[in-house]
Image: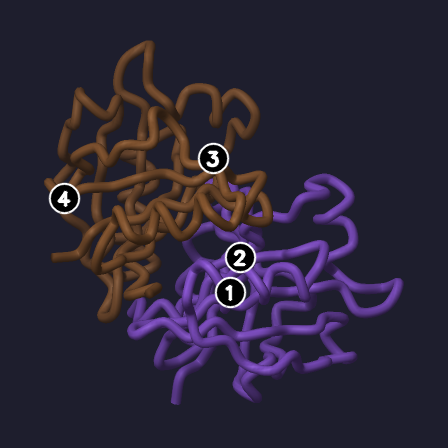
Chain colours: A purple, B brown
Amino acid sequence: MLGRLNHVAIAVPDLKAAVAQYAGPLGATVSAPQQLPEHGVTVVFVELPNTKIELLEPLGADSPINAFLERSPSGGIHHVCYEVDDILAARDRLKQSGARVLGNGEPKTGAHGKPVLFLHPKDFNGTLVELEQAN
Amino acid sequence: MLGRLNHVAIAVPDLKAAVAQYAGPLGATVSAPQQLPEHGVTVVFVELPNTKIELLEPLGADSPINAFLERSPSGGIHHVCYEVDDILAARDRLKQSGARVLGNGEPKTGAHGKPVLFLHPKDFNGTLVELEQAN
């Protein structure tokens, strides 16, 4: 069931500084910043040969990243996103195992225009897990 | 410079339970547990099509994972590991940019038998970064 690691998301307090570091001394290819008001983030993609890192900066007062940065002001790894073939089948299998799906349990459209769900970190070793339907 | 994402490491308080979850409802291929006393961890690899997740359980009283689990008892994402072609060149470039290398600054042999270095999380948006020389 578990497919590719689509991305690792890192919350950053200062996107410009993070981009300068990844594009500079770390020598990675970095996309232009993209504002996603419906997700409350400005995002930059660090392109790696096999996956990508998403650098997330809060956008707006209601950003889901604000609370994270209050707890961890220098930033930190926010979530991992795994691809699945069938997000509803994956959800049902996980719910049956006792895992909690965040929100109302229905997939939303994620940053890549595909259906996504988030799973409760307490049920996954303290790790916020995003599932994205790849196809 | 920055190559593949070699792995994402997740610290877990109960490796058996984590393996049951990744192999069960998450439906991933999971390796047999491997004790690495010199790193103070028991590790299991979750094989994804493009990278891997390392589940780390503390091994012994001096395990570097113990302090992490004291702060985050349910576990959490511990570090990301990027591959580089030349670890000494990478280190020197990062040090020149002001980033701190952990330990004595010399590469050690990592869990995969290759030279590795860890970078200070405070210099990388709260993210503990491992560099591994891939070749």
Q: Position of residue B126 (x, y in %)?
A: 58, 43
Q: Position of residue B67 (x, y in %)?
A: 47, 20
Q: Residue A11 or B123: which is nearer the viewer?
A: B123
Chain to which mark 2 belongs: A
* Picture layout, residue B52 above or below residue B32: below
User: Given the current orientation, which residue lies at the most extreme top position?
Assistant: B61
Classed neighbour count for the residue bearing mark 1: other residues with Cα under 10 Å, few (<14), some (14–19), many (≥20) = many
Helix or strand or loop: what does disc 4 sit on? loop
- Quarter in which the N terminus of chain B is drawn: bottom left
Q: Position of residue B113 (x, y in %)?
A: 10, 40
Mark 1 or 4, closer to the camera: 4
User: Left or right: where does residue A62 sit relative to residue B27?
Assistant: right
Type of amino acid under label 1 = Glu
* Picture layout, residue A30 above or below residue A22: below
Name the residue carrying label 3.
B75
Name the residue carrying label 2.
A79
Chain to which mark 3 belongs: B
Q: Residue B32 or B130: which is nearer the viewer?
A: B130
Whole-angstrom CA distance, mark 1 to mark 2, is 7 Å
Mark 2 or 4, closer to the camera: 4
Is circle 2 on the same chain as circle 4? no
Please report whichever mark, 1 or 2, sits nearer to the chain's N-terminal start: 2
* Picture layout, residue B126 above or below residue A34: above
Name the residue carrying label 1.
A130
Is circle 3 on the same chain as circle 4? yes
Type of amino acid under label 3 = Gly
Is circle 1 on the same chain as circle 4? no
Whole-angstrom CA distance, mark 3 to mark 4, is 26 Å
Name the residue carrying label 4.
B114
- Residue B34 sits in which quadrant? top left
